[in-house]
Amino acid sequence: MRFRTLLIVAGLLAGLPTLAQQNIQVSPSLETAQVLGAGAAVQGAALWMHPTDPANNLFLVADNQVGLLVYRTSGALLFAQSSEGVAAGVDVQENVQVTGISQSLVMVANPSLQALVAYIVEPTTLGLRSAGLSPINTTGSVPNSVALYVSPTTGRFFAFAGSATGVVAQYELTGQVGDGGVDVTPVRTFDVGDSVVGLAVDDPQRTLYVVEQGNGIWQYGAEPDAGDARVLVDGITGGGLEAPLGGVALYTASGVRGYLLAVSGGANAVRIYERQPSAHTFRGSFTVGQDGGIDAVERPRHVVVTNRSLTGFPLGMVAVHDSTNATGGNENFKLVPWQAIATGFTTPLVVDTGNPTAPTDGGTPDAGTADGGGGGGSPEVPPVGEPGPVPPGYNDNGLNCYCSSVSVPGTVLLVLAGVLLLSRRRPRA
């Protein structure tokens, strides 16, 4: 009887969904035009969101042989910003006060100048111009990555610069960008160990993620007084990552929900973890396969993700770098709808188009309000938004009724409990 019960239980368990250790393959909808530099040219990417017209959102790619490449989110290359040297990393911070107007600041890691260089995107022409901020000299290390951070508690504005030597430097920017009065102060430096190949900041949770080549993903505090204390999110030795490693990105849904995405280049995959700093539960991984005339992703180094609605991607988008692009030869990015990934897992991921920065300004790049030209303090703090609108067929935890924290349906648990109880009953004499 017990043996038969075990067989029944095993059969039931075999049909249950699993929460982790699941790898799926997804298909791209689009791909970008190839980058201009040959070989391993791509060193990072970021999205710039137009304040009023989603058709004019931009995809920015750091090319270490040419400079900053500016694409439409359809994949078409608009132009290259190469007048000030090459680019080794790029990040965008929304709600920065530039000459009294809230705008999105584009920061580029520039090895040619050994500095971080700031730009503004003109929303009417989509051209780049200087932000009126002198290059941030990274003396002592050549920057190969950059991440921007606004403290949710103090409103102070910071820039992080990573390097191939493993050094991460944090700088504070005070004053108003654009009027020549910005002071840049080094506030923290720490040594990760091996080369830094990825940076990302979770502003609402005051957390910095650093990818150390040859080791794994480290979680640091983003505040300047956080020191060098760190926690390993995932690693190569004893972990799930496979070298070479690459960048990290945050799917920041409304509030503090979302996921941390990380490139595992040796597996041609992107791994997904819960966003909570206290427990980065691994949810699964995905690879990008071939679809029609678009080739599969191989040897990725970078990933970009957004929950925001883009033209052609109404429920968000993931861009995955492809080192072996078959179209044209030079590297490019494959673009995948977020919902294709989220609903591909047995227990779906959250799909939430709520804007975490709750934009209020319709006339300046990405959120905020003009202050009439006055002021001059730190950039405005992006407020944490309320939960955004739920797309049809979804709830707060994913598709239909699935709950992201439950892997075994309650009804099946009741059946199992009943089977076990029956197996323990003894027939009466």
Image (cartoon, rainbow, N blue to C red):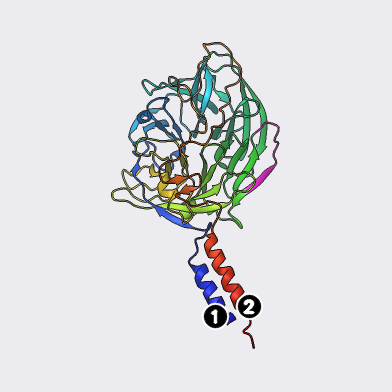
Query: Residue 160, image x and y in percent?
Result: 59, 32
Q: To which residue does mark 2 refer? A: 424
Q: Where is residue 421 in the image (x, y as percent from the top left)?
A: 61, 73
| Quadrant holding the N terminus | bottom right
Q: Which residue is drawn at 37% across and 20% down?
A: 124
| Nearest-to-viewer mark from 1 and 2 | 2
Instruction: Give the side of residue 50 with respect to residue 373, left or right.
Output: left
Q: Can residue 323 be seen in this view?
A: no
The residue positioned farthest toward the left in the image shown? 293
Question: Where is residue 31 shown, x and y percent of the image?
Answer: 35, 42
- Look at the image and say whether residue 231 sits in the magenta stretch: yes
Q: Point out residue 119 in the picture as x, y percentages from the top left corner.
A: 47, 23
| SS at mark 2 in the image | helix
Q: Crowding at label 1, few (<14), some or many (≥20) Cα neighbours within 10 Å? A: few
Q: Is 395 situated above or below 266?
A: above
Residue found 49% across the figure and 46% down from its top: 350
Q: Name the residue under label 1.
A: 4
What amino acid type is highlighted by mark number 1? Arg
Residue at x 52% of width, y 46% of height: 262
- From the image, give the main secondary structure of the stretch colored magenta: loop
Q: Is residue 41 left or right of residue 223?
A: left
Q: Quadrant of the C terminus?
A: bottom right
User: Would you place residue 235 above or below residue 48 in this image?
Assistant: below
Q: Which portion, as a residue range, is magenta? A: 223-232
- Tell me: residue 428, above or below residue 382: below
